[in-house]
Image (cartoon, rainbow, N blue to C red):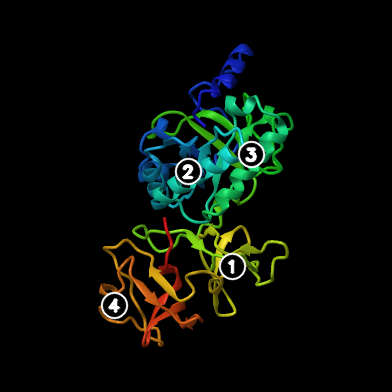
Amino acid sequence: MKLKNKLIYIVSLLIAGLFFCTTNVNAARTDMVDVSNHNGYMTVSNFQDMLNNYGVKSVVTKISEGNYYHDYTAANNISTAQQAGLYINGYHFARYTTVQGAINEADYAGKMAKADGLPIGSVLITDVEAQEQNGLSRVTNNANNQAFMNEVAKYGYRSAVYTMSSWLGTKMDVSSGWIASYPYDATGKSWYSAHHSWQWGSTYQFKGSYGDFDVSQNYDNFFTGQQVPQGDTKSTIKNVVSVRGNGYKAFTTYDESGKANSGTNITSGTDWKSDGIRVIGGKPYYHIGVDTLIPQSSTTFSKVVVVNYRSDYGVNAYDSAGNYVDQSNKIFKGGTSWQITPDLVNISKIGWCYKVASNEYIPIKYAQGSGFKG
């Protein structure tokens, strides 16, 4: 990533007389490229050139840094990469030094990623290589990194740690991450193949694109899978679900298969971030964490949903036969609330839906729990 500490690498290479020149040497695969404001606003044609002529499959764009900086090119880069047919992911440059600080930065990164349109299911990496972490113990860094990844999962994003190879096992432990280490000639090499990806260069140049780029070789589909956009680019995913009641009560949670999770009950009166709804046995469950679900009937929104679109857009309703109900998108506007029946209805060609009126149904991806707050 284009950051100050990259000078450490450059200086070490200069001392050894092994500096990357601006022309590309024979190298490892360019499966993935990361971008930020240093590269300007990337265009669809920039990314299409990378896809068609260099074998790039995925992009990681900078989203945020600390709890104070939002990369102004992120929204553009997310949109143009998707239009070019590339998988898109994001990264956050970490400044945290405590568990609470990591949680705060994860909340900031998650909110910025949502606002920028980063798809649900994509990766939001924590980039841990700053001086703030250099002075901490390995145990502290491990705890902080885990706290960041746990919190990001509540926004519907997967995560891992990006760091330099010299920090592995010294400043932190990374079981499967994204590791940076730059040989003079990466031809035929497969360094750090036990991890998701190896970043092997930071001065790669693509014809038609501005500046130098970090490039990586991927070893699995971590950066090229599980992206499930919800609605369309005009929709607003709102993401806090409130558990019912003010007095103490423990509500059972479940995994994706419908099996009860032992020891992970949720207390009444608490709020949880959710990336959407899963269906188990014809009933809706809110996804509130990695492989953690809570029945909608256990929340304050068990009888009402809100159309999950920007207020000036409406969604189509369908009848029980799967036919579009004429003019319904003028009624079911974004932000409007509708009473629902407790069970979902599976309509042929449409999928699982809420019943919101007599013989009128809205697909669950367009309706979220009443009371959600962004």
Q: Check disc 4: other Cα within 10 Å, few if <14, some if 14-19, many if 20+.
A: some
Image quadrant occupied by the C terminus: bottom left
Q: Check disc 2: other Cα within 10 Å, few if <14, some if 14-19, many if 20+.
A: many
Q: Is residue 243 above or below residue 40?
A: below
Q: Specify the label residue 108 is tagged with.
A: 2
Say what amino acid the circle numbered 2 marks: Tyr
Using the rendered view, name the quadrant where residue 309 is placed.
bottom left
Inter-mark Cα distance, 4 to 1: 30 Å
Q: What residue appears at the point 42 percent right and 64 percent down from the top-left corner? A: 371
Say what amino acid the circle numbered 3 marks: Asn
Inter-mark Cα distance, 3 to 1: 27 Å
Q: Is residue 344 above or below residue 295?
A: below
Front-most of 365 and 46? 365
Whether residue 47 is visible, yes or no, is: yes
Task: Kindly state the secondary structure of the residue where label 1 is placed.
Answer: strand
Q: Where is residue 107 in the image (x, y as percent from the top left)?
A: 50, 46
Tell which circle, 2 or 4, labels the residue nearer the N-terminal end: 2
Task: Kindly state the secondary structure of the residue where label 2 is placed.
Answer: helix
Q: Name the residue under label 4.
A: 328
Q: Check disc 1: other Cα within 10 Å, few if <14, some if 14-19, many if 20+.
A: many
Front-most of 109 and 85? 109
Q: Name the residue under label 1.
A: 294
Q: What residue appears at the point 47 percent right and 43 percent down from the top-left corner? A: 108
